[in-house]
Image: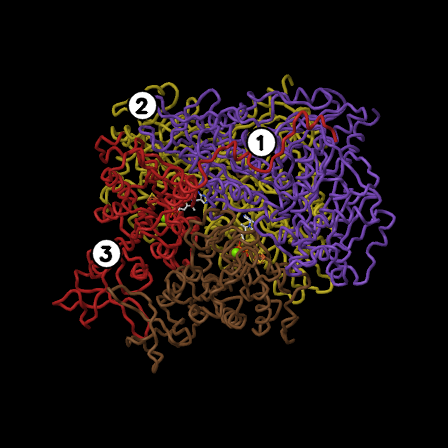
Chain colours: A purple, B yellow, C brown, D red
Amino acid sequence: MVTQEKPKETLSSVTIRFVGDSGDGMQLTGTQFTNTSALFGNDTSTYPNFPAEIRAPQGTLAGVSGFQIHFSSNNIHTAGDHLDVLVAMNPAAFKTNINDLRQNGILIINEDAFSASNLKKAGFKEDEDVFSRYLNKFRIYKVPITKMTLGALDGLDMMAKAKERCKNMFALGLTYWIYSRSLDPTLEWLESKFGKKPDLFESNVRALKAGYNYGNTTEIFQNTYEVPKAKIVPGVYRNITGNQAISLGFVAASELVGKTLFIGSYPITPATEILQELSMYKNFGVKTFQAEDEIAGIGSAIGAAFAGQLAITTTSGPGIALKSEFMNLAVITELPVVIADIQRGGPSTGLPTKTEQTDLLQVLYGRNGESPIPVVAARSPSDCFLAAIEACRIAIEYMTPVVILSDTQIAIGSEPWKLPDLETLKPIHTRIHEDIDTFAPYRRNDDLARQWALPGTPGCEHTIGGLEKENITGKVNLSAEVHEEMVKIRAAKVKGIADKLPPLEVYGEQSGDLLFLGWGSTYGAIRTAADELLASGYKVGQVHLRHINPLPNDLGEIFSRFKHIVVPELNSGQLLMILRAKFLIDIKGINQVNTKPFAVSDLVSRAKELIGDK
Amino acid sequence: MVTQEKPKETLSSVTIRFVGDSGDGMQLTGTQFTNTSALFGNDTSTYPNFPAEIRAPQGTLAGVSGFQIHFSSNNIHTAGDHLDVLVAMNPAAFKTNINDLRQNGILIINEDAFSASNLKKAGFKEDEDVFSRYLNKFRIYKVPITKMTLGALDGLDMMAKAKERCKNMFALGLTYWIYSRSLDPTLEWLESKFGKKPDLFESNVRALKAGYNYGNTTEIFQNTYEVPKAKIVPGVYRNITGNQAISLGFVAASELVGKTLFIGSYPITPATEILQELSMYKNFGVKTFQAEDEIAGIGSAIGAAFAGQLAITTTSGPGIALKSEFMNLAVITELPVVIADIQRGGPSTGLPTKTEQTDLLQVLYGRNGESPIPVVAARSPSDCFLAAIEACRIAIEYMTPVVILSDTQIAIGSEPWKLPDLETLKPIHTRIHEDIDTFAPYRRNDDLARQWALPGTPGCEHTIGGLEKENITGKVNLSAEVHEEMVKIRAAKVKGIADKLPPLEVYGEQSGDLLFLGWGSTYGAIRTAADELLASGYKVGQVHLRHINPLPNDLGEIFSRFKHIVVPELNSGQLLMILRAKFLIDIKGINQVNTKPFAVSDLVSRAKELIGDK
Amino acid sequence: MTQTQELTKADFVSEGDVKWCPGCGDYAILSSVQTVLPTLGIPKEKFCFVSGIGCSSRFPYYMDTYGFHTIHGRAPTVASGVKMANPDLSVWVVTGDGDGLSIGANHTVHMIRRNMDLKVLLFNNRIYGLTKGQYSPTSEKGKVTKTSVYGSIDNPLNPVAFAIASGATFAARTNAANPKHMQEILKAAADHKGTAFVEILQNCNIFNDGAFAKYLDKETKAEENLILEEGKPLLFNNDTQGIVMSLEGSHPRLIVEEVNTTDTSVSITGKKFLVHDPKNEDHTLSYLISQLGVSLEGTPTAMGVLRAVRKPTYDEVLYEQEAQAKAQRGVGILKKLIYSSDTWTVTEESQAAGV
Amino acid sequence: MTQTQELTKADFVSEGDVKWCPGCGDYAILSSVQTVLPTLGIPKEKFCFVSGIGCSSRFPYYMDTYGFHTIHGRAPTVASGVKMANPDLSVWVVTGDGDGLSIGANHTVHMIRRNMDLKVLLFNNRIYGLTKGQYSPTSEKGKVTKTSVYGSIDNPLNPVAFAIASGATFAARTNAANPKHMQEILKAAADHKGTAFVEILQNCNIFNDGAFAKYLDKETKAEENLILEEGKPLLFNNDTQGIVMSLEGSHPRLIVEEVNTTDTSVSITGKKFLVHDPKNEDHTLSYLISQLGVSLEGTPTAMGVLRAVRKPTYDEVLYEQEAQAKAQRGVGILKKLIYSSDTWTVTEESQAAGV
Ligand SMILES: Cc1ncc(C[n+]2csc(CCOP(=O)(O)OP(=O)(O)O)c2C)c(N)n1
Ligand SMILES: Cc1ncc(C[n+]2csc(CCOP(=O)(O)OP(=O)(O)O)c2C)c(N)n1
Ligand code: SF4
Ligand code: SF4
Ligand SMILES: [Mg+2]
Ligand SMILES: [Mg+2]
């Protein structure tokens, strides 16, 4: 391929979003762009955006599907606030996404899709000149993508429909050219995917190259860009979504515990993929049980835990409501069950495909009685791996149900994952008990974890259940003294987990004007905001919690080192309430409940406001 | 009846507890004593104590059933901390209750029941002298109650078993004599109950009188007591339990709304009686639906609310877990449904027959997403009537689900209820909408309550549901702006309720050293403690919340008038957390989670500790 | 808007876009319902559609009637509440094989056994559509889906049999790909007083395409469909075959026999073909017919109304009891209720009287 | 404690007091289970009893085995988890008519259709005992209870029929007042591989005394009980009456006929009595028999094993699939799994190489 030299500009970071109809293959296009960039050496972060409908009628606003990639020569932590490039395959995609494009950003549209009927479907007038108002705002490139694609495939013996379906490859090729990417990774992937279907292989390759060459040869693009490699810690990497990483984390944990993994679940967005992913691992001995509902899902997990497996159940907010009665049974029977809650927008069915952090209080307090459950949170897609292991560790070592929180953004977002050295992962110790003489179902070790005598163990026969019970013997007892004691023991056990946690890491300044305290998927935005502030000389620090219950013991001391404490959350201030009640200091929240991740710029400006004059 | 004169001592308050086997009729005995005392003119407060088992084997610890009455010449608010008199019908009852008898209190036991076999069933040695260690501690009266009863019924043509069953009347007669009560109310009641069964009538009357005469004629009781009338606000009174009062409150509310009452519920202790009670009122048009589970219970209520009835569902803690997904649907569809949560001991199945205040955070936060629900609490058995009406008022006038909290203590406890003047109850205004031109399902009034257009209304056809929706039109819309707006509107609506609440009443000192802030069933104990402290010259006040969400607007101002704020709760500090987070002042909790109501003495001493030197 | 006006299909079409996948079987059901409703003589405002969650459960949004899109599996409970509150309404439950038979099967059972007067449309596509393709309680054993990578190991439920065994007074099966038949069945369901359970076979062309192809393919159609007609013998395959009751080995079971060419009510071996009798008080035959094609191999699947008997509905009896109670006890008076129990009066004087 | 030792009834009696009401039918069930278990040849530690909530569900506390008193209606789910985790255990579900058929009916259905290898004892006293006397899904229509002051308006479910229609591979009915029969049935259930559903009629002498008196009264006993025996004709009332299949009006149904005095396999009218055939792959006869006495008036109630067929159990297939997957794909290696996907390597050099 002869590359005509056009001026090349170097950029440090670019955010690009491909949007089109559900059937336009945008997820695939985005994934290819991501992989190519990662292989090249950029740091990347991605976030797909699915419609709530499976496949809404073509061309409608409801059917728009998108995929956003942020790639950079720096280390990045978010999928990007504002778009540098928007590739819109039809009017509906254009309409629903144009507001996210930054001033002077690049807009590439498939001119052929802006027909009268498509304009109408998107709610425009049939003859509306939809671009006129943006002429001065964006750099607009109208490309006849469909026509060019069909042209490139001329002579291939395929239906027109099938040919047209290659237009995403054209768009991909074009963006590759603009950002000076190599076609090789995608060519290889096409080979592996369509190697046995020569027609499909040929058509996709042709379209990809046509797009590339179109950029190269036409006059409309003035210049190309390059985003150099990032400084990345050496290692083996793969791209991973949160739902994949949490699944692998559970499998890894089961190896570390030395117990079979059991998952009892019921499908629900955005948690379903975990059940799907794990159902492929039967050769690892993983047992997946698609139950009749959420209740049966956790019920089976509790049964499996009683019988000695590493038991988990996965769901999202509305499913937690259904599981909470059983979560409470796990609390009082002190069984190790991990409940993964992949949060989504609420209340009620709410916004099933959108992200939110609004389940925190529900998982902490959504049960009758005093019912403490440890809660850990994952901060990014790849972090789900370690978070899952940590959840399993606490469950097994302390004999307790544990909640792990993720959310839509983490679950379906992806980032490069530096693959862990599996040897360095610490084994997880069980409380399996087989000795008749020392056995008592509620006899505890120093961590207050009770013995785990599995059905099938001779001589350790015992019955557990949901009624209040005596310590040590586990006998049902509803007396005042016993209840008081057991309420305290259950609380102390969970609280005690904090005593063995490593010290918190404070990123940035160790003391100063402002501390960001966060948890979960806000990590990337907060880190980026902290970096910006630090770069401008602000004295800010960041603590991001893995453990929300119990809170780490050193939190108060860290708070004392900063003038302002700020807790950004994608809810109305849930962790905030707990912290204010506990520390009685005027911690401030930055709260947003609008389906969107934080914009870094908002965090930065809010922080500056609080700090006032430096 | 000739009354031999024995010395009479006047007392202001007495607490007496009848305890025996489940089959011994202790509930009935206690109820009679209560009614007689109320009719006489005392203030009364009672608290029964059932075993968790239906009818555990006779004579066992598990089968003990008790009934406690506090009667007084003062206004009283609790069933009493310590017992002045314990009437124990068998060893098991003796064993499980003796620790509650105060120093020098009166212990009356049925000597005949202290057989070797009964002693064994209660876990004593067969020949154990169980009283020896108490000789100096209590005034012990061993009465051959069974023998005396049988003797009194000599000649009646009845089975011995049936005769023996009258022994509770003997015990009742005896206590009537000791406390100078008239036999007439009980005689009348026996007449109305057994009038048509002459044998039963005759035997019970004979036993009652025999007990009375036994006290009168034997030498073992040195003197009798009298507890003069209390100063009671004139009016018509009846004795009522919380579950009865809440039921009547719902019926009254349905009249005030002008809508049929619908209750969809599933039985669960201690809420079951409400469903039972209401199922008798079919002639009021009350519809009771015993659903297949808690979920169906609230689901049917939501359906009935959609169709325009005053809809309620009743349950206890574990049932809330099951209802929470539907509660959330009621939040987003903004339908008026009242959820009555009669709290019991947890976690899990926990302590089904015991009292606790541990569901507060669950009803506030146990749902996915930001999901505000107003919460009101009843403070005493009779107060349930007004609390129920208030819950219905908020639900209907604001178009929102509302939680009303009660608990075991209130639900099964009783007190005299000054019957309300029904004319003074304010009508409840609905948002029923029938005008086509102005209709939009989510169009709101100043209180942000949406229109309530009932299926069947021509021209107002519309669909509601659990997905996020636009304001006014109610159309499904998952966009960032709409979600953000709706989250705010839902929050503002609930918050706005506070703007129309009457000012809080501060009991006792209006400013000073210490303010007790409470909610729910702790009212009586706190009020009594406050009275004691006030009497000793302490500057204390008491605020008891009807509304927990939203909190009244004047709370902060009231806080500012006291040095110490103390929140006694029968949980680990649930309201406490909310208040500390909100007001950032070092509010202290008095917390107890041991199945028991607060002892007044504990509250008093803790308050004194905090106040320090006066 | 009012009863006097003639209603048309258009009156039941709501404003917004329909958002199912192009080609989805749900469109045909929607259109059929919209076609049938105006023929029922019921004013538009009296219709109320209640659904759970699933592709199927989006249905109420597309109807210009009262509607409630509730939560997963729970539509029967909300619909029951609506009906009890206002028995004057025509209340329809729309659900899917996952919604109504997995998470929601309990409510389905209890609604049916109570004979709550609801019309129930169960869209059976043998898959979870909305969550993008997991097996459902009606998926075939061995089916490979996203959560059954090695093949499902659950035994499927037969929705109509399940309904009949739960005590359904009306149970029917139809195919969304056959609008004429479907509309007949919908009309029959609407006319039935009591729970009217209708299983509608519905193609999910995205995640389970062709699940019911055998009922539509020219080749197999005749031998796979047994079209039920009241009072007619159970014949199929262009009346060349029919269903008889075998008592062989003293074990009663339905089997297929060839028709005696001259007499289509009698089989070659002389046995009488069973005559369809959906109104029989006894549900035996309806239940047996529901097994055809589904759990009995080599037999055709029964399409049509399997059962339709009139029994008192829950809402009827609820209101009857209320009327009786009012007649017996008199219409309740709140003041009486509150003041009725054992009361006592405290007066200024009784107070003054002291001890 | 180990397999070598002979187990006795006493080995299964737990320490604490049994806390049911004196006279409760539950005692007899407990005693029968404790009598049967030692005869099964299963080591004591391999038994696990899982229950929901209700009087019946207190059962595990009284057994000296592994036990789990879970939450209301959900025992089948926990028991399924136990069984899947360790198929080596003998797992028993103890439930009541409220626990298993009201709040928990959905789990009951799905457990059964999956044929999870669990023994299920449903104590049917036609009342909610533990909550002190409300009607249950098996209470008769019109029953007056604390929540049905004017008489219940629900139509009752027939537990055994419900189980068979849900696909039960084993379904039986027995009476707690008849320990000998009960023990036979318990043994048969224990020996069955797959979900073994046993309805046990149980008297609640406190809240529903005499609910099953007709099966015990000398007067009515013979005509009300139909004792099932495999391969025997369905005769009762001291072999003077029996059950035949009527095809009158072309409507198949079971009816009672008098026995021809000389030949007890044939009725007076010459019809053959049906022969009990619980192992037949087809469930028609079992289902029809389950209706006797319950939904068919004037017929006796079938007591015994109505159905017992061997089909693959869920847990069996689960482990088979796992074995196959391991055989085909090799036993999974974590490192491979993690490193298998598209990976790339960043080295010091590639870093150094710059753009
Ligand atoms: C409580 C809860 N659990 C799970 C889900 C996720 N969910 C939505 S629809 C559905 C299954 C839908 O299947 P089906 O009823 O067959 O409807 P279809 O989409 O096939 O029409 C599931 C599991 C949910 N919304 N709520
Ligand atoms: C979630 C929940 N709902 C309700 C209850 C109250 N409850 C306990 S047992 C029971 C019914 C028991 O009836 P059944 O299963 O027939 O058992 P029985 O007591 O008659 O043996 C109910 C409603 C509960 N414990 N938990
Ligand atoms: S996923 Fe299937 S059922 Fe759902 S709308 Fe698409 S085609 Fe229809
Ligand atoms: S209430 Fe009934 S079922 Fe429960 S223990 Fe007592 S007699 Fe048995
Ligand atoms: Mg489906
Ligand atoms: Mg029962």
Q: Position of residue A62 (x, y in %)?
A: 68, 55
Amino acid type indicated by mark 3 = Leu
Residue B352's image quarter?
top left
Q: Which mark is residue B130?
A: 2
Q: Is residue D220 above or below residue A362?
A: below
> Is A574 in front, or is C217?
C217
Identify which residue is drawn at 41% across, 58% down. Answer: D152
Tag 3 residue: D228
Same chain under badges 3 and 1? The reply is: no
Viewer-nearest of labels 2 and 1?
A: 1
Same chain under badges 3 and 2? The reply is: no
Q: Quadrant of the N terminus of chain D?
A: top left
Furthest residue toward front: A2
Q: Residues within 10 Å of mark 3 (few under 14, many from 20)?
A: many
Q: Is mark 2 within 8 Å of ligand 4?
A: no
Q: What distance separates the C-alpha of mark 3 from that of mark 1?
A: 57 Å
> Is D176 in front, or is A91?
A91
Tag 1 residue: A376
Residue D88's image quarter?
top left
Q: Quadrant of the C terminus of chain D?
A: top right
Element at label 3: loop
Amino acid type indicated by mark 1 = Val
Q: Residues within 10 Å of mark 2 (few under 14, many from 20)?
A: some
